[in-house]
Structure formats: C-alpha cells, structure tokens
Amino acid sequence: MTTTPPLPPPEPHRFTVETFLDAGSCGSVYRGHDHETGETVAIKRITDALSNAQDAVRVLREITILRLVRHPNIVVLKHVMLPRVTTWLPDLWLVFECMESDLHTVIDANPPLSDDHHRFFLCQLVRGIAHLHRLGILHRDLKPKNILVNTDCRLKIADLGMARAEDAAPSGVCWTDYVATRWYRAPELIGCFHGQYTAAVDMWSVGCIFGEILLRRPLFPGRDSISQLRRIVELVGKPPPSVIARMSNAVARDVLTRLPDCAPPNWRAIFPRHLASDGALAVLKRMLAFDPATRATALDVLQDPYLVGALRPEEEDDPTLAALKVKVQTALPSEAVTRRMDADTVTRLIYEETLAYHPVAAEAYRQRRARDDPAWQFAATPYPNAPKSQPPPPAPSDPSSFRDSLPPDPSQSRDSLSPAPFSRCRVTSA
C-alpha cells in the first residue's frame, strides 16, 4: 500500500490531502485540511468502492449510521465528497474528524495507565455502546484498533461497517481480520459461521478491550477456535452444563463439553493491584460472564459503583430517542435485503447518502427523479458481467423525505471524569 498522497480529491477547492496516516482493508486514511472550516480532518479514500458487493454494502451501512447517529463517543463523519461521475462510484472519499491515535497504539506505547484513565476510557466506551444499543444497533466488530483516542483521553468508537440493526434472526458471523477479531468475539459465536448476534456480544468485546487496557496485552489471543475457547475457560471457568446446553453454537457446545472441569483462577494473580483496582476487576468480571443472559449490559456497567457519575439521566430520558430509533431501523437495510441488492441499487443508495452533504445537488437529483429523467439513473455498473438491474422505485411522494438534514456535531465539553492527559502517547493513526 503506497503512502504517497493520492491524486487531488473530487473537491480540491475545499479539501487538501496532506500526509498518509493508515491503511485498512477498504482503503487508506490521510490527514487533510478543510479550507471551509479551517479544521484538520481525516480523509478516507476507499478505492474501487463498488468492486466487491460485500464491501459496498459495508460502506453503505457505515455512512448511513454515521449520518443519523451523533454522540460524543462515536466518530463524526463530517462530509462525503460528491463523486466526479454519477453513473458509478470508482472511489469514495469520506471526511472524518481527525483523531490522534487508536487504543491499540495507546496501550502499546504507554506505561501502565492510572485507575483514573481506566475509568474514563471504560466510561466513554460504554456510553458510546449504550447509545448504539438504545437505537437497536449492534457494532459487532469492537477491538482496540477500532477505538480512536486523543492525548487528552477523548475516545470515539469507529468502523461501523459491520454494524447491523438488532434482529431476532441469526445472521452470518463476520470474520474480517480473522485472527485479531477472534480475540474479542463472544464464546457463543466462536467457531460458527451463522450465529445469534445480541447486545451481549458487544459487551463481551468491551470486556476484552477493558481487560487489555488493564493487562496491557490481549486477554484471549487464541490461535484458532478451540484454542480461543480454552483460553476463555482458563480465565472465567467452565460454564455449567445448563449454560452449555442452551448454546445454539454446536461447535462451541462440543468443545466445551469435552473440556475438563476447572474453577476460575485467582484473578488477583493475573491482575495485580498495581494494574487493576478492586472496582475495575469487579466490573470486568460482570462483562466477561460466560452466559450472555447474565452478562452485564451497557446500562448495568454505567450504573456500576466503579463508574460513579457516568450515567447521564438526560440521555436515558431523551424523548427523541424513540423516533430516532425508528428512523435508524428504517434506513438500515436488513441482511436479507442486502443479499438481493444488485450493483446499481447499491450504487444508487450510496450516492443518495452522499447527497445528504450536498443540498444543491440533492435538490437537482430530486427534481430529475420526479420528472423520471433518465439522467438520474445509474446505467453503468462497476461489477464485471453483472446483469442489468431494474430501474429503482419511483421517488417518494414527499420529496423532503429523501434525506433528512444532518444533525449537529455532538458536544465536546470536557467530562468531569476526565483524568490528566497522557504523559506519553505515540500518535501514528487516525
């Protein structure tokens, strides 16, 4: 992956690409400058955005969620650049707020953090997850690399491409970044390719991340699915037969049944007091409960004595959450729907999401759709040998319902729980 800046972005009058920051599975991230606001931003270029249908749907989900969901602990998608062509999207350019580093780098680069840092990181992480869960959204890919931080200890959850609306039906288990992601996967999903995602799955990942913050190394670095389950049992103990029998995952049931009985070890031997306080260990155990039915929820953790003052009543009682949840659930396509989407449909939906950041272009697009002007249709397809799709459905009767205006950026006011900034923090990515 080249680290040299790419060609000028589609909106060179507003954005300048400056230095390379990081590379991922879907593209490269650069530090850039927004000349309109004067801000430093992170610009993500997704190359050949629609060359793979699965990746294209991930992009669609992420930009849809980040358009609707604004929270101080969820990364802000500030802008999506309008593509130079509208018949298909060779590249996508997403503009995010610029963060200094990620949690993986902070854990690796710093000496053991204080208990104040532990509390503040956990508080922010669980607040962000609690907000997603209130809206019926499951992140499904939580790990330290997907948690962005600044040296002032501000934390933001990122990479929502794997997120889904909470659904009672089982869905495919995501295996991206296979080894690294497995370390943070709940035991009820290990070893299966079709499982039941619930909010408890996210909370297990939060527990793994918090344990890594305390211990400064991954809790369960399994080599494969069996090794992963063995490591989990070595720390939390073998679950009783009644819990194993309730697991829908046949692979996990078989492995756990054959494992010898063992009691949980003395956690203090693993987490000495200079690494973890009593309160930190107590809340960690609640998040790493083997049985998802007894695992702590995000609200449970926010109400834990370890995080006194973390729960914000105004967020719990927000009267707009119910309407926003309906809007999010309506906007997010289900897995069954996305499996039936052809290339042109995904292209059109991503382009429409882009128009939320371009009111003038959005109004012209609405007018063309209302006239059934073929200029708005996506006749070209980036997929080789893909069948021609049917025209998209007619425009809604109320043109204003096409895309809502963007909500304001979340408040950046300093939190009362915030500890002192890091003494050292290696900044390598955004």
Image (tube, rainbow, N blue to C red):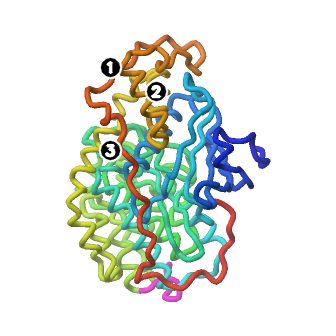
- Tell me the residue at 39%/68% (across/down): 236
- Nearest to the eye among marks 1 and 2: give it: 1
Element type at mark 2: helix
- Tell me the residue at 32%/19% (across/down): 394
Please report the bounds of the magenta region as a residue range. 270-277
What residue does disc 2 label? Answer: 348
Q: Which mark is residue 201?
A: none
Q: Which mark is residue 394?
A: 1
How many residues crowd mark 1 within 10 Å: few (<14), some (14–19), many (20+)? Answer: few
Q: Which mark is residue 165?
A: 3
Q: Amino acid at mark 3?
A: Ala
Rendered view: 172 above or below 40: above
Element type at mark 3: strand
Asked if residue 354 lies in the magenta stretch, the reply is no
Mark 1 to mark 2 CA distance (whole Å): 13 Å
State which tag comes first along the sequence, 2 or 3.
Answer: 3
- Nearest to the eye among marks 1 and 3: give it: 1
Q: Amino acid at mark 2?
A: Arg
Q: Amino acid at mark 1?
A: Pro
- Tell me the residue at 44%/54% (across/down): 185
Quarter of the picture containing the C terminus is bottom right
Can see residue 287?
Answer: yes
